[in-house]
Amino acid sequence: MKRVRAKALQVAVIMGAVGGLMSGCGTPNSVAVANTASASIKPAHDVKGKVVTLYFGSYSVTQQIYEQKLFPMFEKYWKQKTGQTVRFQASFDASGAEATAIANGLPVDVAALSLESDIDKLEKAGLITHNWKATPTHGMVTDSIVAIAVRKGNPKHIKTWADLAKPNVVVDLPNPATSGGAKWDVNAIYYATLRHSSASEARSLLTAIVKNVQVLDKSGEASMTTFVNGVGDACVSYENEILEKSNHLKTFGEVIPSSTMLIENPIALVDKNADAHGDRKVAQAFIDWLEGPDAQRVFMQYGFRPVNPSLKSEAVKQFKKPSDLFTVADVGGWSNVNNTLYGTNGIWNQVLEGR
């Protein structure tokens, strides 16, 4: 099975041609891309239509689960159901960077990104033309929550968001300019404070925490890698990433603040690319399968919270529920969040200026 790495594909798209790319297995792969405005790949199927290549893009945190578990499972499922062989070529990067690459021509058929506004970017680029939220899970493929990774035994006694602002606490945090995960992290810190205090106190706390950040990593995965490598006292991250990288809390711990945000991760068929490649049917089937119980149980094994209603009772046994678990909708939706925090004159840029 061939995997195309995000950086290699992105560079190739920008250059206007892809040839002899290196796959994830280290073997060359030939893909033809027309240009940044209209990337096209000839669908990889034989004359009888028995083989199809599905082009997939997601954020870096999910790479292991897709490559090691979900791709092989779906290939087997689809072969048994239809007799057709599916092969995946996949790109993984920080969610914001991945969305930008797809909007600029990365020829992805299915995009599973970190946040809704990244999918909105593809809609605005004219790549998604259907109502991608019209699914039983409202277009979401996984849930998680924003939590804090701490060193084993929690030597800095971190229990709340405010504790991340203490002197001599080094915090690992990714950069919202490139990382969808970072937006979830910053959202959780700011709005958890705002819901129980004032806007000025929420901004002050975010400012104080950012001053304890030594490096703003490109992605949530990179930030967690920084923590795993021994840098920092705490890492703000997805709960699923904390559980996976800690071997389910064996190597380091997790703190769930009493007020935190529900992470909702979207998935969508990229109409323009899927139609150009002739693989819409398989692409949609893959999305439907990912939202079903078999795939959702795999996500749960990796620390994600399921979006499939049939698994909610199982999730209650596996995951803790904070007393104040709020959603993006609860704080005004992504348009309001982006304007407030990440716009040109938004709070995040003001915080960075005062860092």
Image (spheres, helix red, strand yellow):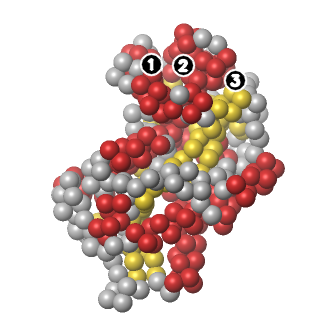
Residue hosting label 1: 347
Nearest to N terminus: mark 3 or mark 1: 3
Left or right: residue 221 versus residue 153 is left
**Element on which disc 3 rests:** loop
Q: Residue placed at 59% from the left, 60% from the top? A: 291
In front: label 1 or label 2: 1
Left or right: residue 183 versus residue 19 is right
**Element on which disc 2 rests:** helix
Residue 155, how many percent across, how many down? 73, 27
**Element on which disc 1 rests:** helix
Outermost residue toward the right? 317
Q: Residue placed at 50% from the left, 69% from the top? A: 285
Distance of label 1 from label 2 (alpha carbons): 9 Å
Q: Amino acid at mark 1?
A: Ile
Distance of label 2 from label 3 (alpha carbons): 13 Å
Residue hosting label 3: 160
Residue hosting label 2: 206
Q: Nearer the viewer, residue 311 or 223?
A: 311
Nearest to N terminus: mark 1 or mark 2: 2
Mark 1 vs 2: CB contact within 8 A: yes
